[in-house]
Every structure is written in C-alpha cells, then in structure tokens.
Image (spheres, rainbow, N blue to C red):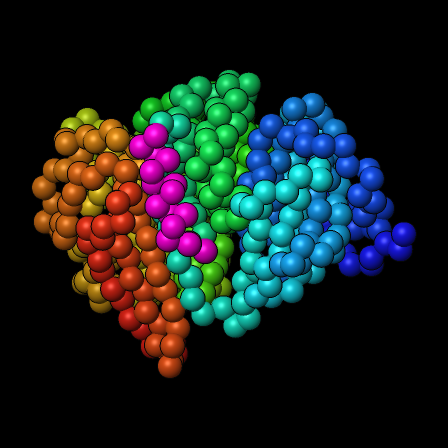
Amino acid sequence: MTRPTLSILFGALLLGAVFATPTVDAFIDSESSTGVTMDFGPTLGDLTASSVRIACRRAEPGVIVIGLADASGAPLRRCLLACPAETDGAGTLEILDLEPATRYLYTVDGASNDAWWFETRPVPDETCRIVFGSCADEKPGSSTVWRRIEADSPSALVLLGDTPYIDTTDLARQRSRYREFGRVPAFAELVGHTPLYSTWDDHDFGRNDTDGNLKGKENSRQAVMEHRPNPGFGEAGEGIFTSFRQGPVEVFLLDARWFARTEGEGNDPTLLGRRQWAWLERSLAASTAPFRILACGMVFNGSVRPFKTDCWGAYPREYERLVDLIGRVGDEGVVLVSGDVHWSRVMRHDTGARLGHDLMEFVTSPIHEKLIAAANPPHRGLVFSVGEINSFLEIDAAVEDGTASMSLRIRNASGDDLHTTRFERKTGDP
C-alpha cells in the first residue's frame, strides 16, 4: 500500500525528553497491530492547534501502535510509540502537523474506544474552559467529580497535586501509584479526550509537608515524566514547572517542592529556586494572554492550619519576590490558583499599594471526601470559604468585541456553583 507523507514525531519519553525520528518508517500497516498490550493510558496531554501528546505504557517494554483517523473514522496515519525498559515500558508520543479546530479519533494497538478522540485548538483561539483540582484518590467520591467534569466538557484539566497520594520516593511505588490512579474508569475516560496538565504537591512529591531536600526526589520526577504528558518538565533536569495557553488564558504551573529550601540563607530560603524564578520572569514577560494564572499545590498565603510549614506564608521573602515580579512583568490579569488544604477559599491579597490592585487567590480542595476544618482560619482578605467535599474550580474565559472575560466558579460534583468571581479586561490592555 502507499504510505502517506504527513510528518509525525515517533519516540519515547526518556529522562524528560521526547526523542524523535520523523521518517516514513514511523508509519506501519494495519496488519502489524497485535492487539492492546498497554496497562496505562492512553492519557491525552498538551494539545495545541497543530499538535497533541499522548502517553501510554506497555505491560512489557516494546512498541505501541497509535492510529489516527478523521471524525468519520477514515484512517490518516499510524504511528509507532517506543516504550523502552528505561522508562518501564512508558512512553509519550507527540503528533505534529495537525489541522486546527479539527476532531480526530485515535486507536491503540488496533483497539478503539468512544473516549479516544481530541479536537485541536482553533485559530484564532478565543475561548476555553479549564478545570483545576487537587487532592484526589481512587474512591467513588473522586469519580463523581471526574464524571461531573466530563459532563461540563472542559478544554483542559489541571491537577495541582496529591493526585495521586504516594508518600514515598521509591520508583516502583511511584510508578504503580500513577497507574492505579490512572486506571479508575471515570478518570481514564475523561483524560482519554481531555488534555491533562499537572504539577505536584507534597504527597505525590514523596512525603507530607516536605521540601527539596527529600532524598530520591529524582525518582518522583521520573514517574511524573512517564505518566503525565505535559508540554515540558522544568529545565536542565530539575523541577517540573511548565506552562500552556488556551484562549485568553495562559497557565503557569509552578513547582513549589523540588527547589524548596535548597538555596538561600537560613532566614531566606528559596521556594522556587533561581532557575524557576528566571523562567517565570521570562515567561510572564513574554506572555500576551489577557489573563495569566499562576498555579501550584501550595497556597500563596499564610492563613493555614496550626503548625503547617508548607505554604508561601512560610517563605515571606519569596512571597515578596513574587509580588515584585508581578509588578515588573505582570498586570491586573494575574490570578493565583492553589490547592492542598482540603478547604476551598477565595482570598484577596493586600497588594493595592504595590500593584495598584489586590491579587486574588482561589484555593480549590478537595476532590475526595476528606475535609480539614482547621484549614479555615481567619484572614482579613477572605472573600469566600466553604468546606465542600468533591469540589473543583472551573474557569471559563472568552474574547468578544475587544473584551476578554473570565469567570471562576467553585463547583461541586452535583453541578452546583458555590461561588463565582468574574473579571473583564480590554484586550488592548498591556
């Protein structure tokens, strides 16, 4: 048969990089498929107007065949995904040269599933619905959230950590926990066609309330890279910070664990680290998005339960650097999103004198059923607070007639909106 000449990326996720050989040898005939051999995935990852990432894992190292078809099911390409022993059979395929605003179906080793599809971003890209959540497990309560998110038809899902709970840096355990979490039917269905973006918090980093001095943290990073098809994973083999844009929103996923307390003086320890600070300043300065979301698992304030040491409030000079940075390269379109504390809150940061406006923070937690009442202490900027199990944050944003709007809703598994905040900006604003 005649092989198509469309370009693809053929490779495996190995130590944080996708190794590519964009040749026609990456196309194979349908007869080569031998049946589904994967035991994790497929998980849809970074999705743009012209590309997509898909993560899978074989039960044994080898090759997975991913087929691409149009919305009618007509075959377009067949791609080989190498899943080597070095990554315990896990791999991430990036497919390039896709058409914008186009629905594609895909198969895995010849098998199809109604959940295995995606639609590339449009050009121009003017709307999005991005869901944020933290603190989830494999129990039925978390699945009620996955099903609600599915019903809401989001354009992206962002997990802010403790997703899953692992509490060790042992590589075998790290890997097995991501797979157990990923096999939950409601979650697997959702991420089969919804782009997933992730950062970590303490329990998936390796231990409760820990920092970057944790031994074995490189194993935790390896497991993230194998199972979460982010756009990138930090820089120079350190951290997992990254960013992506949909519609008028750019999301900056911060890593508040890898570098924490690994640099700086005793009374001024780092949280983000020099490398991540430099990346954030460059990236914020280069962003043209009307709205910029700075998101991490760790809350950006110090109003936490007694004796809790992992929050931005425990790094006061780092918090001041963040406000200064926003003043230099940010604007009124910056919003903070966090999780972790098993309580949902909306807080106004007193930055008016320095920025000309108050920063707003939206804390969303938990997806599961475990609440911590002590995580609701007083705060003079508190706008809203609720202890709501099975909850998440949903952001809708759009550009219309020269105005960008963004609504942030704390929402529960029943579909109730518990709180809504709306922002508007002229798209010509700096």
Looking at the rendering, which quadrant does residue 172 occupy? top right
User: What x and y, as percent, mark residue 80?
Assistant: 75, 41
Viewer-side residue, 288 vs 263: 288
Q: Is residue 226 positioned above or below 192 on the image?
A: above
Q: Which residue is drawn at 66% across and 44% down?
A: 107
Asked whether residue 147 is drawn in magenta, I would say yes
- Res 235 seen here: no
User: What x and y, as percent, mark residue 100?
Assistant: 60, 66
Viewer-side residue, 394 vs 217: 394
Q: Which residue is drawn at 61% across and 47% down?
A: 53
User: What x and y, as percent, mark residue 365?
Assistant: 27, 39
Q: Is residue 422 positioned above or below 37 on the image?
A: below
The residue range painted magenta reads 140-155
Q: Is residue 17 positioned above or below 123 on the image?
A: above
Most common SS among magenta residues? helix
Asked whether residue 189 is drawn in magenta, I would say no
Q: Which residue is drawn at 41% across and 48% down?
A: 150
Report the residue that reaches farthest toward the right.
1
Report the residue that reaches farthest toward the bottom.
401
Viewer-side residue, 23 vs 149: 149
Viewer-side residue, 107 vs 73: 73
- Res 187 seen here: yes
Q: Which residue is drawn at 28% across and 43% down?
A: 413
Query: In the figure, is residue 166 to the left or right of 300?
Result: right
